[in-house]
Image: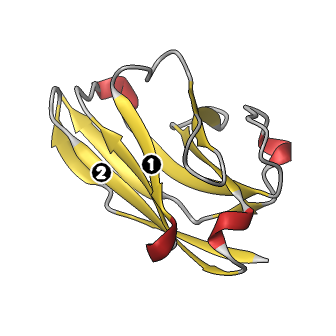
Amino acid sequence: QVRLAESGGGVVQAGGSLRVSCAASGRAFTTYGMGWFRQGPGKEREFLAWINWAGTSTLYAEPVKGRFTISRDNAKNTLYLQMNSLKPEDTAVYYCAASSSDRPSVRLGVYGYWGQGTQVTVSS
């Protein structure tokens, strides 16, 4: 069992940068592979990035590859998503999620635990 809480969202101009965080509590953080997702208005939730238990392996969706970086600090029980070169189409609610599997996955159903989301708005 783990509880997740995102923070760090806000408004940023196109081309700018932002880092969102996900604080985990409950079960040991290193038990879980972690992912970042986002959901824009009227759209389905979209996979962005994944990181394994040890933080030694990552996977990115093509729309954000090269711009976003996922990382984790297990000593602080915190997951991060560094977002650079932001575009207006990046505007969405950003969610972190946890899975007991250490295999990478883009499927929402694999992730059993979700945060409440944090709003990121990119202005043109």
What residue is pinned by disc 2? Answer: 19
| Left or right of 9 on screen, residue 63 | right
Q: Position of residue 116 (x, y in %)?
A: 57, 66
In the picture of the structure, the residue carrying the numbered disc 1 is: 71
C-alpha distance separating marks 2 and 1:
11 Å
Q: Amino acid at mark 2?
A: Arg
Looking at the image, do the residues carrying marks 2 and 1 touch, with CB atoms under 8 Å apart? no
Question: Residue 90, located in which quarter of the rendered image?
Answer: top left
Residue 44 occupies which quadrant of the picture? top right
- Residue 52: image location, x then y, percent: 65, 46
Residue 66 vs 111, above or below: the answer is above
Q: Residue at x 18, y 43 (%)?
A: 12
- Please tell me which residue lies in front, 116 or 68: 68
Closer to the N terminus: mark 2 or mark 1?
2
Residue found 60% across the figure and 65% down from its top: 115
Instruction: Name which residue lies at 52% across and 15% down.
Output: 62
Secondary structure state at the residue bearing disc 1:
strand
Rendered-image quadrant of the N terminus: bottom right
Front position in the image: 84 or 33: 33
Q: Residues within 10 Å of mark 2 (few under 14, many from 20)?
A: some
Picture colour scheme = secondary structure
Q: Quadrant of the C terminus?
A: top left
Residue at 30% x, 43% y: name it. Answer: 121
Q: Secondary structure at mark 2?
A: strand
What is the three-letter code of the residue carrying label 1? Ser
